[in-house]
Amino acid sequence: MASREIGIVGLGQTKYSKKPNGTLIGYLAEAGRLALASAGMEKKDIDGLAISSFQLPPDNAVTLCDQFGLSVSWAWYFTAGGAGSLSSVLAAIQAIEAGQANAVLCIAGDLYDVNAHYKLMGNFNHALSNYAVPHGFGGPNGLFAIVTRKHMERYNTTREQLGRICIGQRASAMLNENALLRAPMTMDDYLNARMIADPLRLYDCVLPCIGAEAVLVTALDRVPKEKRVRVLSGYERHNHPPGEIAPLEGGWALFRDRLYADAGYGPKDMQFVQSYDDYPIMVAVQLEDLGFCAKGEIGPFLARHDMAWNGSFPVNTGGGQLSCGQTGAGGGMIGLWEAVCQLRGEAGARQIPSVSRGLVAGYGMVGYGHGLGASAVILEKAT
Amino acid sequence: MSAQPNYPQPYEDADNAPFLAAWHKGVLALQRCKGCGKAIYYPRPMCPHCWSADLEWFEASGKGTVVGHSLVWRPNHESFQPEVPVVLVEVALAEGPLMLSRVVGDDREKTRSGAAVRLVTMSDAARYPLPTFRLA
């Protein structure tokens, strides 16, 4: 694991909206500027750029340097969808440790309105385009409905149990001005919402939207203490298990022991979890794979916990993608942004009291049936 | 059967051309690795199990078992809208590989985990871009 003296010192987030108010490059630029400003650093300090965005091609990290007027010694462009933003931070830390850069701006986002969602999912990769799209697969909704039903059948997980994730996150979103969905949600609302892909209903699915996030990675001692967030450990694993269409596990289980051992903490020491929430079933699978409960026991675990920011087990304390919206690849950074915000004590009305440590998990890049990428980091407020 | 729907079509390439050509005749063709003997789906340029590039095509039985399914009420393309719910299935083919497919027919909503499925008849196959199933 990379040096603990390198970490996250700045964070930025644009306003979320259903329709764009500017270009993708404009949104990425704004998130980057905000992250730089929150660190109290300047453009001349940046010598590395990492970008996570589905819609950026034909542009890339190097052409963005031209747009931004940056000369950099290290540039990175993502590959693992919603797992990619955490990968960018891990890669940035390693690059800084290796002397390839001093300060890396990691930015993620897309102009991901509903039309852009359909366009992207219709041509996401060869396997999906050739062997799923011609079946009317319904996009990720159809695929994750299969995963959800399989978990319900194999482990007796119920919609009431999974719905507690969505309801807890909505309670947090009500205190987040940037969340697009802020109306109160009851269990009846959740259970009786419009059917999308049985067993998934409307509030199991994310609202595609416009926005971007950014974090600044550099040596922690370049900023005042209250701005420092240490990355205690982090790993990624892609395409585990290979060859399955709708597995009930992902790569997290393979690295979780190292993740906790490197950090020097266990699951019980985490004061929040920001988990990739394209669907509640994937939050459930991440919590199982990351050791918060045994495989198959997430249903009772959810039933006895409250997942709101002030609940017994805070999950996605800004509302997550399920309530804020999914900004394309930015969905892989919203949890990291929220975690850094909480650890700096900047979460306002939804600030978790006395919080010093938490886990962020990433997931994404839907291949032939499910998300292939998995990542996670453990963060701590530097003292 | 109504007129031919405007379904999105797969893109033919060097890896999948024999598979698509077989389906045009109502046949499910799979690859088999001559290195490790395993059957493969979806079409690959090399065996994902042992990385041998020595693959051969064979005609599969067209039989399988439902492993998972969803009832899609909001398909990804308007051509499917008159046919909702689209019953999307994960099928374990008799030859081993897993396949994402569709169960069609008036009784498709009776699809359950463990249900036996068979390919649609040759006369119906022309309607669908990819191998498609009915309840057995």
Image (cartoon, coloured by chain):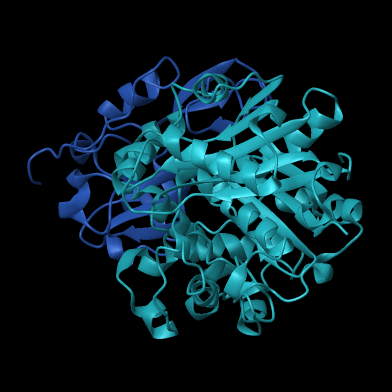
Chain colours: A cyan, B blue
Residue B4 falls in image quadrant: top left
Q: Residue at x 64, y 29 (%)?
A: A49
Please state if A87 lies on the left or on the right of A3 as rendered: left
Q: Residue at x 59, y 15 (%)?
A: B54
Please state the total of marks drawn on the protein image: 0
Please state if A255 lies on the left or on the right of B17 as rendered: right
**Who is closer to the viewer here, A242 or A312?**
A312
Please state if A154 lies on the left or on the right of B122 as rendered: right
Viewport quadrant of the C terminus of chain B: bottom left
- Is residue A357 among what the camera can see? yes
User: Residue A108, how many percent across, how many down?
Assistant: 55, 41
Please state if A258 lies on the left or on the right of A62 as rendered: right
Q: Residue at x 63, y 38 (%)?
A: A106
Is A264 drawn above or below residue B97 in the view shown? Answer: below
User: Residue A228, how many percent across, how many down?
Assistant: 79, 52
**Who is closer to the viewer here, A19 or A192?**
A19
Is A190 drawn above or below residue A340 in the view shown? Answer: below
Residue extending farthest left: B3
- Is residue B113 among what the camera can see? no
Q: Residue at x 78, y 74 (%)?
A: A354
Is A312 drawn above or below residue A223 in the view shown? Answer: below
User: Residue B89, how many percent across, how many down?
Assistant: 40, 52
User: Residue A338, how many percent across, how many down?
Assistant: 62, 59
